[in-house]
Amino acid sequence: MTEFRTRLAARVAVGQGAVETHWHVALLRIVRRCRRDNCAVSRASDESCRAANLAK
């Protein structure tokens, strides 16, 4: 988490456009991780995937 905060702070220093890009990339990574870790085998719906992540 510290690394994430450090990177975010660096991007904020660069400018607002960099922050928007960062959040877009971060969101894609979260979605991909969710699907890969919890839904790849069962092909569960996104709702089931979110529930599985909350249970962790």
Image (cartoon, rainbow, N blue to C red):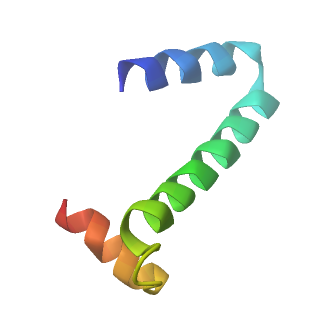
On-image quarter of the C terminus: bottom left
Q: Is residue 8 left or right of residue 55?
A: right
Figure check: 1 above or below 48: above
The image quadrant that residue 55 belongs to is: bottom left
The image quadrant that residue 3 belongs to is: top left
Q: Looking at the image, which residue is at 65% across and 21% down?
A: 12
Figure check: 22 above or below 35: above
Tally the marks.
0
What is the residue that sits farthest to the right in this orientation?
17
Task: Give residue 23's position: percent from left, percent from top.
Answer: 63, 43
The image quadrant that residue 9 belongs to is: top right
On-image quarter of the N terminus: top left
Q: Looking at the image, which residue is at 38% across and 75% down?
A: 49
Task: Give residue 43's position: percent from left, percent from top.
Answer: 47, 84
Closer to the camera, 5 or 3? Answer: 3
Task: Give residue 19's position: percent from left, percent from top.
Answer: 69, 32
Figure check: 34 above or below 21: below
Q: Looking at the image, which residue is at 46% across and 86% down?
A: 45
Task: Give residue 42's position: percent from left, percent from top.
Answer: 40, 84
Q: Is residue 31 left or right of residue 18?
A: left
Q: Is residue 29 left or right of residue 3?
A: right
